[in-house]
Image (cartoon, rainbow, N blue to C red):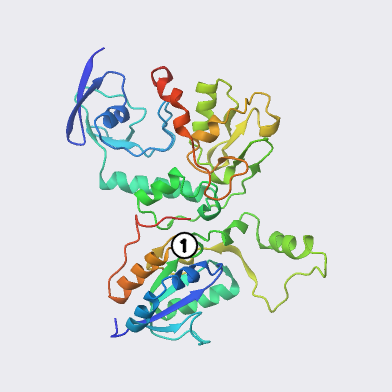
Amino acid sequence: MSVLTLVIEGQDVAGPAGRTILQVARENGVAIPTLCHLEGLSDVGACRLCMVEVEGQRKLLPACVTTIEEGMQVTVNSDRLTAYRRRIVELLFTERNHVCSVCVADRNCELQDLSVEFGVTHFDLPQLHPKATVDATHERFGIDHNRCILCTRCVRVCDEVEGAHTWDVMGRGTEARIITDLGTPWGQSATCTSCGKCVQVCPTGALFEKGRSVGEARRRRPYLPYLVAREGRAR
Amino acid sequence: MTAKPRLATIWLDGCSGCHMSLLDMDERLLEITERADIVFGALVDVKEFPENVDVTLVEGAVSSEDDLRKILEVRRNTRILVSLGDCAVTSNVPGMRNPIGPGPILERAYIENVTLHPQLPGPLVPRLLPLSRPVHAVVKVDVFVPGCPPSADLIHSVLDDLISGRMPVTAGVTCFG
């Protein structure tokens, strides 16, 4: 395997061919914000928070799905990138009904954390206030589509780790929704094994354990060490 | 700013929690009242919103015709308008009715779920606007203080800045919820 050298945020770094900018950056202590990425799952570049500037490229590139190249010059932080990232957080908030004060994930939410990191104190964009449903038909878990940001972590963990592929995405754009099986209620799913991995990987309050109230949705991600162990295979 | 800034607070469609948090400043309230004149709000027996107010803290979303009338009057007479708390900043809980609309919501609350004399609110109750909106969707807002509610410490630091003639920075120090 050949080793490639590149510059990330002014730092000379190296990594084996096939590694992503995100992996090499994090190995070298350079932070890149992410939301849909989760260590151990495949990457899909859905949230666009990890967009970086690569010299010679006019387009911004998502660090989680862009593999390193010899001589690459990568900028992780710039005014332009910060402005885009802040706008992405704002778009995620305004697309659904994220009412933090009554959310099961209040103070345990990666979207809320990002709003602090990027200093989002209000939304310049109008909120869409879509009609979104809650499916509470499953015995132990529920999904509140008002909180879903379509990161698809649940889809990937269910497919790649549990092997059930109960979850998928239906519809396009603002109409897109996470579904179980072919859109049947979660409680009637023939494939769901009730393992709860989807609930543990959800970055917001969209997937929750029943019986938890506001601010109680603490995720037990350390209970999923096999995710990291599988990292090599996921790619 | 004048020698002693004129401070006001107003409460639109909110739960009063932000005003409770304001009261949670405890003895620091006395310090604030020494440095500023509180000219309007829940703590002051004044019926009409006064002119030439330096700073107004607004709690709550703009949900009814009455809220709209009030916020327009407040903005006309205020130099620095502060959106205090999530309802003012995002419409928060009052905004949860937005996907449903005012008609069906009133129907549900005052007819369907009522056993004794079900009736819709009469002309004495301000009519609901089609959407419950954040304050800055209606008038210009100068300072945003998210939080449900914002902590007493945060409100104190915002007031301390404004009374001292500084613009407070709330980015990165508070969050929604």
Q: Residues within 10 Å of mark 1 (few under 14, many from 20)?
A: many
Residue A232, quarter of the rendered image: top left
Disc 1 chain ID: B
Residue A57 percent across, percent down from the top left: 26, 32
Q: Is residue A185 left or right of residue B24?
A: right
Residue A148 percent across, percent down from the top left: 53, 42
Q: Is residue A226 above or below residue B31?
A: above
Residue B177 percent across, percent down from the top left: 48, 55
Residue located beneath label 1 in the image: B89
Q: Residue at x 52, y 55 (%)?
A: A101
Compare residues B126 and B47 and report the one nearer the observer. Answer: B47
Amino acid type, label 1: Val
Label total for image: 1
Q: Is residue B106 above or below residue A15?
A: below
Does any portion of residue B177 appear in the rendered image?
Answer: yes
Hey, which residue is sitting farthest front in the picture? Answer: B27
Q: Residue at x 44, y 31 (%)?
A: A222
Compare residues A192 and A96 and report the one nearer the observer. Answer: A192
Q: Is residue A143 left or right of residue B168?
A: right
Residue A85, quarter of the rendered image: top left
Q: Is residue B164 above or below residue B146?
A: below
